[in-house]
Amino acid sequence: MVEVSDEIWELWSEVSLEVFIGRDSYLLCDGKLLADSYRKFVETASVYASELPFFILTAWNPNAQRLSSRTNHARQARLLLELSNQKVKFWPSRGWSSGWSESGTAFFAKGFDLVDRLARDFGQAGYYYIFDDHLWLVDVSRSRPALAL
């Protein structure tokens, strides 16, 4: 796992995150958690999955190295297959900040073990975690504490 620079960590902390269910989209974060939008999303998503916490992870651009769109889409498809194999309900998501935009996957999971493993398997240094109306940026290596956004 490549150490993430402070510059990239800062960029990730200023993220906007959007999740899609069917034709509806929910802007969950615009530099900070948008609690009302998140609650509406949870109300809709709880029809499909009720357990918390909620995670957003991508397979794009491992170790902050830009890959081709084709390669990124193939990696993302492998992540979705892995989640399906784990019987995890997931939704497409998108994250962006100044200078970057990536597809991602939003899902409920029972704990951090699965998410940490998937993040490592797909070369991701961090992911987003929402619990109890708080959004966190989590460093997979745990070399820095989770950052409340």
Image (tube, rainbow, N blue to C red):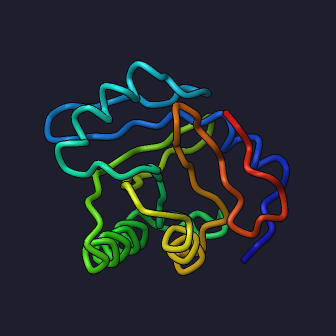
Judging depth in this view, the residue of 25 and 86 nearest the camera is 86
Seen at 47% across and 53% down, the residue is: 55
User: Residue 48, percent across and down?
Assistant: 19, 50
Point out residue 33 in the picture as x, y percentages from the top left corner.
54, 28
Q: Residue at x 67, y 33 (%)?
A: 149
Q: Does 25 sit above or below residue 124?
A: above
Residue 71 x/y as whole percent: 41, 73
Residue lying furthest top: 36
Task: For the N terminus, give its image quadrant.
Answer: bottom right
Q: Quadrant of residue 45?
A: top left
Left or right of 73 in this view: 117: right
Residue 95 sits above or below residue 64 on the image: above
Q: Residue at x 80, y 68 (%)?
A: 3
Going 66% across and 69% down the picture, which residue do you hit? 63
Q: Quadrant of residue 72?
A: bottom left
Rendering quarter of residue 36: top left
Q: Nearer the viewer, residue 94 or 85?
A: 85
